[in-house]
Amino acid sequence: MKNGLFDRFKPKESKFFPLLREMADVITEAASLIGDCVQASSHEEVVSIYKKIKEQEHKGDKIQNTIFTELNDTFITPFDREDIVSLAGTMDSVIDMINSSAKRIMLYSPKSLPESARVLALLLQDAASDIKSAINDLPNLKGKADSIRGACGHLNEIESKADDVYEHFLIDLFENEKDAIEVIKLKDILHEMERASDSAETVGKILKTIIIKYT
């Protein structure tokens, strides 16, 4: 028979790293799908892609809830509980923002999406790749600290590029789009995509905090 109290004191860090890797995989899939969404040729295609992104969003929520449950049931954790909570929550926010972007494209059905939307989608895919790389290195934090720092630095660069893309998009939008309704639609969609890049950068900041604490 297992001793429940004893089990709570046993190291369970092996449970957290696979869950975080699963979350990173969800981000990667959602980022790939938003790239398809901004280039969809019909509203029906957008609806189909949005449903797939929504499935990933549900998946991310389940993984986050599992992580919280494991934290409640585990005494020894690989990092501070607050860091694990922040990391999982912010990774989930990236997924939520991507889902929210796709939902707006589906609901608003704009006449067309600007090139800036495609560029932001590509930047989100790059960010997802960096998050996945950093999370994969996390179990070997001391040996992979430089690699994780590099990924985090790239996330910061991506966020800065996304800001620039969004700012130039706004300038062009207000100068050239005469339909006020389209202005509102496009501004809201691309702002949500830019927010996803902000969340991705925050993932990097949390990882850098973990590096400082544990190396």
Image (spheres, grey):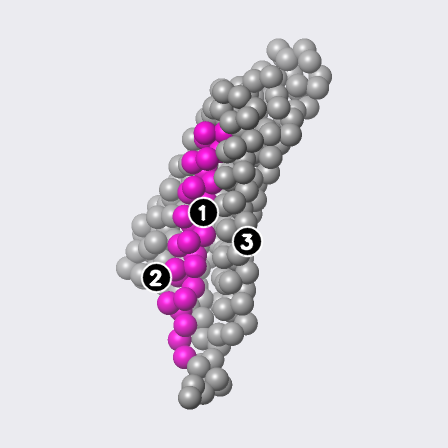
Which residue is rendered at x = 47% and y = 24% of the image? Answer: 39
* Quarter of the N terminus within the rendering: bottom left
On the image, numbered disc 1 is attached to which residue? 26
Q: Which of marks 3 and 2 precedes in the sequence?
A: 3
- Amino acid bearing label 3: Asp
The CA span between labels 3 and 1 is 10 Å
On the image, numbered disc 2 is attached to which residue? 139
Q: Position of residue 27 (x, y in %)?
A: 46, 45
Element carrying mark 1: helix
On the image, numbered disc 3 is attached to which residue? 61
Element carrying mark 2: helix
Q: Nearer the viewer, residue 95 or 197?
A: 95
- Amino acid bearing label 2: Pro
Residue range in magenta is: 10-37
What is the chief secondary structure element of the magenta stretch? Answer: helix
- Amino acid bearing label 1: Val
